[in-house]
Each structure stands twice: as structure tokens, then as C-alpha cells.
Amino acid sequence: MTYSILILGGTAEAKALAGRLSVHPDYEILLSLAGRTKAPAVQPVPVRIGGFGGVEGLARFICERGVDLLVDATHPFAARISRNAAEAAAATGTDVVALRRPEWLRQEGDRWREVADIAAAVQALDIAPRRVFLTLGRQELLPFEAMKQHHYLVRSVDPVDPPLDLPNISYITARGPFSEANEIALLEKHAIDLIVSKNSGGTASVGKIDAARRLGIDVVLIERPRLPEVASAKSVEELAGMIAQRAVSVRKRGE
């Protein structure tokens, strides 16, 4: 009996989970990516790229494909997608689980200023010119054009096109994970004295947070949005175990 799993991905954990599940002969897995990255990483399972068309579109897709389990393994800041997933699962009576990676927690030596959103992060920048490292999605950079006095360093997976209307800005295209040592070298090379980051949690991008602590650099940290309350796990291993239990339950009901 095939167990159909739809993974909403775009994260390193989603790829790792898909790889872990792909060895199971009874799982039929489809990994869905939003398509915001021009050259997504190679995945270990079949991939669907593009949006669904909101809750109704996702619900229709779930029904047409006969999905048994919907897995929300999206980024912690992909709140709209997570809400759509929870609502579509409820509307179709489909089981849903989520990966909720733990937040980064403040440690001794951290120089954090925690803010609610991008707008608050822009306002948190000092009036006096600073050298700011922006580690945000391309779609979230535009508001920083209001603060033209700073020198910015922007890192993204794809080039920022069109470039921002800022007089002092440098761009880096790179795909993580990034080690603490590499982040220290980058911050020192560009004389960065302020980082703007989301509290994404996890290990792939924590290197910049560790490097900032080591170098005594200020961090404007954007707090996570509130996500739907569904059955969840904190790690790929834990989530894979939850999925295995659900598959066994479905198989027993079908016998």
C-alpha cells in the first residue's frame, strides 16, 4: 500500500527529510518548491515547482493527487504558506505535520536588538552611517532604500535584480551553509559593524550569529511570525519518526 506524502520545502531540512524518506519502498514522495530560487539545489525525490493558488488550489491538488500526509517543512518565516497548508489540510481532512526548528536563543556576549518585522528592522538602524550586512530574502530588501546613509553588504542565493537604489552597496551570491570561521572572515573583510537577520534558527545560517558574538557586532534580529498549531517536530529525525508512525497507522486501517 503506497503512502503518498507531499512535502512543502525550500529548506535544507526539507531536502534532508526527502532523502531520508526516499529509501522507503512504500512512500510516494513529492517535494514542492515555491520557485523563488532560479537554480534550486538538486533534490533526492521528484520535485514540483511553483505555487498552488492559495488554500483552494492546494486543497484541490491534495485531493487530485490523493495525498495521505502533508508535511510543512518550509522556512520559519513562510507564515502564509504554513497557514495555507494548515487550512488546506483541515478542509480536505488530510493529516498534516510540520517541522518547527528551534529559534536561536540569546547567549552571553550577544548584542541583539529584537524587532517584530522588516519595517521595525529598518527603523532600528542608527542615523549615523554604519556598515550593515543584510542577510534577508531579495523581496525584503527594498525598504532599506529609505536608509541611504549606510554602506550595505547583501548576500543572496540569486543576484538582486534590479539592484537596490543605494549609493553604497556590495553584493555577494552564495548558498549556505556558512561556517563561523568563514563568517568571521567575511565580516572582518567588509568591516561590518551591524547585521540584520531573521531568527531563522537551525544550523545552516547560525555561523553569522556565532561570528557576531565572537566579534562583538550588533545584530538586529527579526522575531518569528506566529505559525499554525499543528503536530510538529523539532528535527528531521523526529519528524521522520512521526511520519513512520502515521504510515503504519494508515496501513493497519487499510488491512
Image: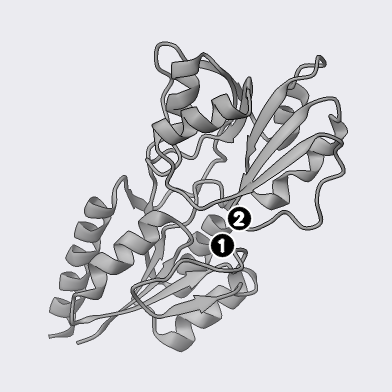
Residue found at the far front of this picture: 189
Asked if the residue at tag 2 contacts the one at tag 1, i.e. Cβ–Cβ closer than 8 Å, the answer is: yes
Q: Position of residue 149 (x, y in %)?
A: 85, 25
The reply to whether residue 128 is in sight is: yes
Q: Helix or strand or loop: what does disc 2 sit on?
A: helix
Q: Is residue 1 left or right of residue 19?
A: left
Residue corresponding to mark 1: 84
In the rendered image, the vertical position of residue 208 relative to residue 142, given as above or below: above
> In screen coordinates, is 1 left or right of 41?
left
Query: 210 and 200: which one is in front?
Result: 210
What residue is shown at x 31% (from left), y 45% (from top)?
234
Q: Quadrant of the N terminus?
A: bottom left
Secondary structure, mark 1, is helix
* Residue underneath mark 2: 80
Position of residue 218 measured from the top left corner of the image (x, y, whole percent): 59, 18
Above or below residue 199? Residue 75 is below
Which image quarter: residue 117? top right
Q: Residue drawn at (80%, 39%), measured in percent from left and top?
A: 143
Q: Which mark is residue 112?
A: none
Residue found at x 33% / y 73%: 44
Q: Label 1 neighbourhood size at 10 Å, few (<14), some (14-19), many (20+)?
A: many
Circle 2 Cα neighbour tier, 10 Å, few/some/many (<14 / 14–19 / ≥20): few
Q: Quadrant of the C terminus?
A: bottom left
Quarter holding residue 161: bottom right
Residue 54 versus residue 42: which sits nearer the camera? 42
Real-space Cα separation, disc 1 to disc 2, in angstroms: 6 Å
Question: What residue type is disc 1 on?
Answer: Asn
Residue 125 in the image: state x and y as whole percent: 74, 22
Residue ID at (49%, 40%) = 200
> Mark 2 belongs to which amino acid?
Arg
> Up-down: is 46 above or below 242?
below
